Amino acid sequence: MSKVKQATIIWFGLILLTLLAAFLGSVDLAIEQQASSNVGLWITLGSLVILIFKGQLIVDIFMDLKSVNPLWRLLFWAYCVVIAFFILLAYYMGLS
Amino acid sequence: MFSVLIGPMSSLFKMPGFKKPLNQRPLPGDLAIWIFILAELGVFSIFFISYAFVRATNLEMFAEGYAHLNRVAGTINTFVLITSSYFVVRAVIAIKEDKSRACVFWIRLALLAALVYVGVKGWEYYGAFGAGYTLHTNTFYMFYFMLTFFHFAHVLLGMVILWCVAQKAKRGEYSANDHAGVESGASYWHMVDLLWIVLFPLVYVMH
């Protein structure tokens, strides 16, 4: 696959993931309260999974770090994962 | 200047006994810009994590602030930044094929997209200030304005960097054999995108 085609597919994928994240953000708070506290948890988890996935696509394809020293890739992967972990931890603190 | 400061660090990778796998490429652009990028990501990470924990202890205030945010503006800005990053990727591909004019074209498109971001962000701030919200309104708005304006400043710096890269490419100073400047500028711009990838869901989505 050519670099242009690959970048274009990834761009399209990132746009779709953004639409999905925006949809999660639009979920009505009233529905959330009527259902259970799990809706808010699923929104947070879904947003974090999308965040990690988008981050990895940008790092691997846009930043072109897929075939460099793995340490660099690990550092940028850690940026997304560590932040996601602490956001989730803070969310649980808020629930309790 | 950064290269002079961190030059010795890069020699670590040239020590005897250190063997790179055959299919491993060097880091795109200058090592200095990657050190700078990591430092910026580190600083923003502290901001993001602080926001998450402060929100956990001020749920009602943050929920009320979140309800007044312009999510449409945030979503548009996400589209625009991702698209701008795509244009920068096309610029790097072009210069690797020795196509300077195409490189300049794609960077100019990236700058145009960045201008859209600046316009949307300006409109968002105009709405917030017009409604009476400032940095001093409460803790939520302090974080909101600090995070977004700090990111906005990085976007402006990125635009200056891209403009300089475009000018040099237009003068023929980059080629297929010498384009570290283009890759460095591109890497900085992707960092700006990477920051927004976290900021958008954290501030505009999660509730």
Image (cartoon, coloured by chain):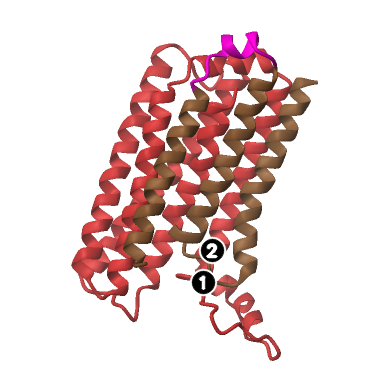
Mark 2 chain: B
Whether the magenta-drawn stretch holds residue A12 is answered as no
In this rendering, would B205 be left or right of B51?
Answer: left
Q: Which quadrant is home to the C terminus of chain B?
A: top right
| Residue that appears at 53% across and 49% down | A55
Residue at 56% in and 19% down: B136
Front in this rendered view, residue A35 or B80? A35
Which subunit holds the residue at mark 1? B
Q: CA distance from mark 2 to mark 1?
A: 9 Å
Q: Is residue B156 visible?
A: no
Q: Which residue is mark 2?
A: B34
Q: Secondary structure at mark 2?
A: helix
Give me the chain that's brown. A
State the image coordinates of residue A19 (x, y, percent, origin top left): 43, 33
Q: Quadrant of residue B74?
A: top left
| Region in magenta | A26-36
Instruction: Please report whichever mark, 2 or 1, sits nearer to the chain's N-terminal start.
Output: 1
* Residue carrying label 1: B27
SS for callout 1:
loop
Question: Which one is in front in this view, the residue at disc 2 or the one at disc 1?
Answer: 1
Tag of residue A13: none
Q: Give residue A82's position: percent from left, percent from top.
A: 69, 47
In the rendered view, would you say B20 is above or below B35? below
- Pointers 2 and 1 in contact (C-beta within 8 Å): yes
Q: Which amino acid type is marked by label 2?
A: Trp
Residue B140 screen position, x and y as percent: 59, 21
Q: Is residue B82 above or below residue B17?
A: above
Q: Colour of chain B?
A: red
The amino acid type, in three-letter code, at marker 1 is Leu
